[in-house]
């Protein structure tokens, strides 16, 4: 492995504990930091404060405090936020009429309307997750304002960029378990759907990003002067059931994975007009600022399918 001499692990058992990262930054110097996303919710995670708010907010502030105290030479920090901080849940999008969604566009300066109290009352791990991501990001910007009042115009010292992906797709390392996003794609060829469902019925959020493009976005955010102290929606502006199926069909026609074609659901036209009622995610600024050249939908979903079939065969 070419990275063996450059990669190391340090275990932080409770990253939400104050000072949890101190020893990391005391041990060696760092120029840049990437703080990646929190785990997705599980059915058993129903305590908003314990499972989402506390680890999300306190864990991130613990990292920032350690950097501030022990790593003043750190130049930049890229944080994986979530498009849910902007748009809320898929349920809130579905609650709008097709006419409302058609004219709706989500932008980098928008926030969902959730509050910690509404998240607690929901008893929904998904809603709690979305609210927790919002509160965590708000805490980051509040920390920046408190520690560095001129941070919005100051290019000296720690610089922060928050990336806001929706569903994240890519070739999985294992089938057990698949992450939530990739499991949505797997349903298109594991027998879950005999007929193509519309986008909402498939449970899809109407935007996505390839995990490899998201990784590139993090790296570019660390060094881009134009990304300093900003937040960006990143990825494709739209996602639908039809887009996934069409991409998998094109891949199947190449016969790279011969058995795939017979496993795809029949298209009965249920999703033919969904793109007319889906809101758009304005990802233009993020793509331009971060210099991203996104993979095509066909490449993303083909790579997911190919890898899953390989894993099925052992």
Image (cartoon, rainbow, N blue to C red):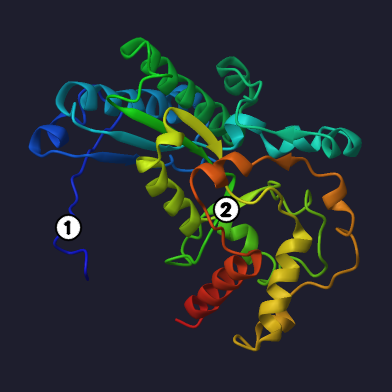
Placement of 271 over or under 106, stated as above or below:
below
Judge from the rendering whether residue 152 lies leftward or rightward of residue 262; answer left or right.
left
- Residue 42 visible, this orientation: no
For the residues labelled 2 and 1, the Cα–Cα distance comes to: 28 Å
- In which quadrant of the rendered image does the N terminus lie? bottom left
Quadrant assignment for the C terminus: bottom left
In contact (CB < 8 Å): disc 2 and disc 1: no
- Residue 56 x/y as whole percent: 41, 29
* Residue at x 52% of width, y 62% of height: 170
For disc 1, the marked residue is 6
**Mark positioned earlier in the residue sequence (2 or 1):** 1
As displayed, is residue 288 above or below residue 194?
A: above
The quarter of the picture where residue 3 lies is bottom left
233 lies left or right of 279: left
Q: How many labels does the image show?
A: 2
Q: Residue 209 carries which label?
A: 2
- Which quarter of the figure has residue 279? top right
Q: How crowded is mark 2: few (under 14 residues within 10 Å), some or many (20 or more)?
A: many
Q: In x, y percent, where is residue 217? A: 46, 48
Is any part of residue 247 visible from this angle? yes
Crowding at dot 1, Cα within 10 Å, few <14 / some 14-19 / many 20+, comes out as: few
Residue beneath the point at 18% across and 21% down:
69
């Amino acid at each position: 492995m070419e990275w063996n001499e450059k990669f190391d692990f340090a275990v932080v058992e409770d990253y939400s504990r104050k000072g949890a990262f101190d020893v990391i930054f005391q041990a060696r110097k760092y120029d840049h930091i990437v703080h990646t996303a929190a785990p997705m919710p599980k059915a058993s995670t129903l305590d908003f404060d314990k499972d989402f708010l506390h680890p999300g907010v306190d864990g991130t502030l613990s990292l920032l405090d350690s950097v501030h105290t022990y790593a003043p030479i750190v130049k930049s920090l890229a944080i994986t936020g979530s498009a849910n901080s902007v748009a809320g849940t898929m349920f809130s999008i579905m609650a709008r009429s097709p006419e409302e969604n058609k004219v709706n566009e989500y932008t980098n300066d928008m926030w969902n309307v959730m509050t910690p109290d509404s998240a607690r009352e929901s008893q929904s791990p998904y809603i709690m997750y979305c609210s927790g991501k919002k509160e965590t990001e708000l805490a980051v910007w509040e920390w920046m304002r408190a520690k560095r009042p001129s941070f919005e115009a100051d290019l000296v010292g720690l610089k922060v960029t928050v990336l806001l992906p929706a569903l994240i797709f890519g070739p999985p390392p294992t089938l057990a378990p698949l992450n939530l996003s990739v499991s949505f794609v797997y349903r298109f060829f594991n027998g879950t759907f005999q007929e193509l469902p519309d986008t909402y019925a498939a449970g899809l959020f109407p935007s996505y990003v390839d995990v490899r493009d998201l990784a590139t976005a993090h790296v570019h955010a660390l060094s881009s002067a134009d990304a300093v102290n900003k937040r960006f929606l990143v990825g494709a502006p739209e996602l639908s059931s039809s887009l996934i199926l069409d991409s998998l069909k094109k891949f199947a026609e190449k016969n790279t994975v011969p058995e795939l074609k017979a496993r795809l659901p029949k298209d009965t036209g249920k999703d033919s007009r969904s793109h007319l009622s889906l809101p758009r995610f304005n990802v233009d600024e993020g793509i331009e600022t971060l210099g991203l050249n996104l993979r095509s939908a066909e490449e993303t979903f083909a790579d997911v399918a190919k890898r899953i079939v390989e894993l099925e065969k052992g």
